[in-house]
Image (spheres, rainbow, N blue to C red):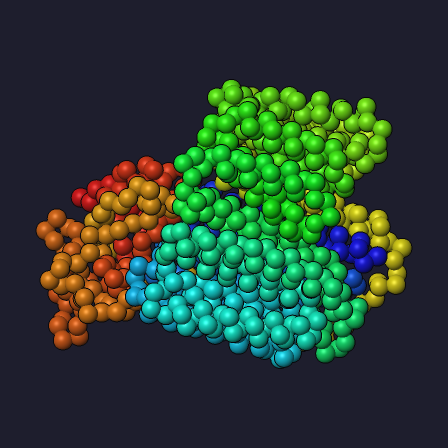
Amino acid sequence: MKTKRLGFNAGYTLASSSLLASLVYFFASNWGVLERWQKLSPMLLLVVALYGLYAFLRVRPNRQFLSKLSLLSCCIAFGIGLAVVGQTYNSHADSYTLFAVWFVAASAFALQIRWQPFYALAYVLAHLAYWLYFFPTVGFSDYEEGTIVGILSVLAAINGLVYVWTATGRLHSPLLKFLSYSMLIGTGIVLSNSLAFEKTFWIFNAAVVLLIAWFTYTFIRSANQTYLLWNGLLVSAFLVMKYVELLFRYFDESFFVTALLFVALFIWGGAKWIQYVKSLGPSVGPADADAGNKDEERGAPARAMVVRALTVSVIAIGTIIGTVTLIGFVLLVLGFENPEYTLSGFGLIVTIGMTAARKLNPVFRYTLLAIGLCTGVGTAIAADYTMLLLVYLAVTVAAFLFGSGLAERAIWFTAGAIIAELWLGAVMENHTAALTVLTVAMPAVYLLHLAVKDLQMRQAIRHCGYYAFLTVFLFLTFAAGHYAYDGIYFITLSACIVWAYRKREGWAYKVGFGFWALFVLWKYYDTAWKLLHKSWSLALIGAIVLAMTYLLERKLMKNDTKQAVRVRPRLSIIWITATVLAELLVMSVQIGRSETILANGATVYLELLPRDPRSLLQGDYVELRYAVSEPPASLAPESLKVGTKVAVVLARSPSGVYEFKRLYSKEYELLPDEAVINGKWRWDRIEYGIETYFVQEGTGLETERTAKYAEVKVAKNGNALLTKLLPALPQ
């Protein structure tokens, strides 16, 4: 019963997500043709409607999840509404304020409802607001190293405080506990990078080591398996960063000699750590946790997932640094005249040896095997040893035939398919042709299972052949870049789904449907469809999923009377209502202030400066730079700190364009042809919050080509709104 309920909840969540996304795409697709009231009124009504749905469902039987989902959708709609208001008036002076206000609303709901999605939303919004406050544009160029270190240190400290609150039970949120812990250590790892922070890296290296050691000790004492495994992933990331730093600083023979020992210790340590944590057993989880430990891990599935993630990470990281170290050792330390012979021989010996060493620890075995394959195959390609690829292909085929278990054979089959494509591509000198050959060959590989009597081998050939056919064919559609291939793949994939359904091949049906969804979303949704198509398709998908979920729920749960009781809400609706009213008030005030500027503000015309075409057009809006953004050197406020608010006096020139005159001071009165506009100092320029202009889909390039001037409304207090872009000044 619980599984069914989770399935229905997932259906309702997917439906609501699709419907909200369709609304966003609808506004984006019709941005240029909608009036202001047509953009703003629906958002206000949507917030009210979703709140009403919450109020209705909160007292209905078996509708607690839907009521909370409605309130979450109401909060998301509020954030979308704030963005729509800002886009409508092209006012983005402080983009962080949108996320800060949204964060306040999400936090209020989280504290009232105490539902984990609200905590997650509030956490993300808080970080976006914090980050955009200091970095409204991409990059760190506006700050000195010490300032950046301070900003990131405060972010780490805030996350540390949140972790303490959640770990001590003052704030009940397992999700926030995990996120804050990860962000705390992750930020420390970033700050420990000696290549980016040359003055303070040693402090944070020591801090990260002490923190990881302390947390490891704590998690071992509590037998917290999931956090121990996650700690292993963070340690792996930390060690890899140190390896890269040392590689850049000490690229010589001594480094690669030491690095060999580092790689060996890394692989050994990773394998032992996984083995140790797994030996602790599922001692902590919902079934075993007491009332004071409810925020711990979510049981065996979560632990198994982290175990797999850590295992794959150790193998992948060990393979990368091991291959780089081995090649560097052979080239720089040993200094052979023909290093390709040594590397090829090593790759072949290790590949064959690890294929036969079946009793070796899996982490050791697969890491060394991957290093051998990468080294050998890479050397064969670089040295043009095409025939050597056939040897590695034969090794992978033999390993597949003599392997055990579907997972192991799938690894060998994947490696063999990659090597076969590389060999065919080298021989045919055309990788599209190579993919075509493999696409045609894979159905034949799949049919081989009919001639195999061994059940495990038959299953491996069926699964691998089917997966490989769909995967290679998908890559072929991208390599060929022709609509004919797309059409054939779509028809073939649909036929596979129908075949699997009629033959009751559940695994093939699920995989085929997954590939179908991936193909449609990737190939057509992002590359061919317009925003309006996305809007209607998402609305249709949301409506269908909602209807199917509701009908299935009624059919499968109609006899379930055990839970069909009205639940009296524990929380007063007064506070939630007050929060929603506050949301509506914030949106209304923002709209009112903007409309006042449009009605009463002074009209000024600013000259646009050309931008780099690579950064001018971003999606369906253009980024602008003004002549008044770059004041004359004699008037530039070089003593101002980055982010300082400034007021600029603009003066009307004989041509009608307003130009930078001076920084505003109350000591001087404004002349009739002058206006004051607020901005922020950004290192070598001033930003006025009107650097973004939203346009109709597909018109950005034309806007970029024709726009020469901007019409701006400036209020008496200096706040500005961008109203339109013009090809020439009005007569």
Q: Is residue 529 something that shows in the picture? A: no
Q: Where is residue 128 in the image (x, y as percent from the top left)?
A: 46, 62
**What residue sits 65% from the left and 41% below the top?**
353
Q: On the rendered structure, is 572 left or right of 74? A: right
Q: Position of residue 450 (x, y in %)?
A: 81, 25
Image quadrant containing the C terminus: top left
Total numbered labels placed on residues in the image: 0
Confirm whether residue 693 shows in the render.
yes
**Left or right of residue 219, residue 79 in this image:** left
Question: In percent of the image, x 55 and y 63: which residue is there?
Answer: 235
In depth, the one of 652 and 474 nearer the eye is 474
Looking at the picture, tell me which residue is in the foreground, 592 or 237: 237
Q: Is residue 120 above or below residue 443?
A: below
Could you tell me residue 396's position as x and y percent?
Answer: 65, 33
Depth order, front residue of 699/311: 311
Nearer to me, 230 or 319: 319
- Report the side of 316 relative to 198 (left or right): right
* Residue 482 location (% of width, % of height): 51, 23
Q: Identify the residue shown where x is 56% and y is 44%.
A: 371
Quarter occupied by residue 484: top right
Q: Quadrant of the N terminus?
A: bottom right
**Based on the displayed image, in which of its 4 quarters is residue 398 positioned?**
top right
Q: Is residue 602 left or right of residue 334?
A: left
Specify the quadrant of the image occupied by residue 455. Answer: top right
Residue at (75%, 52%) from the top-left corner?
7
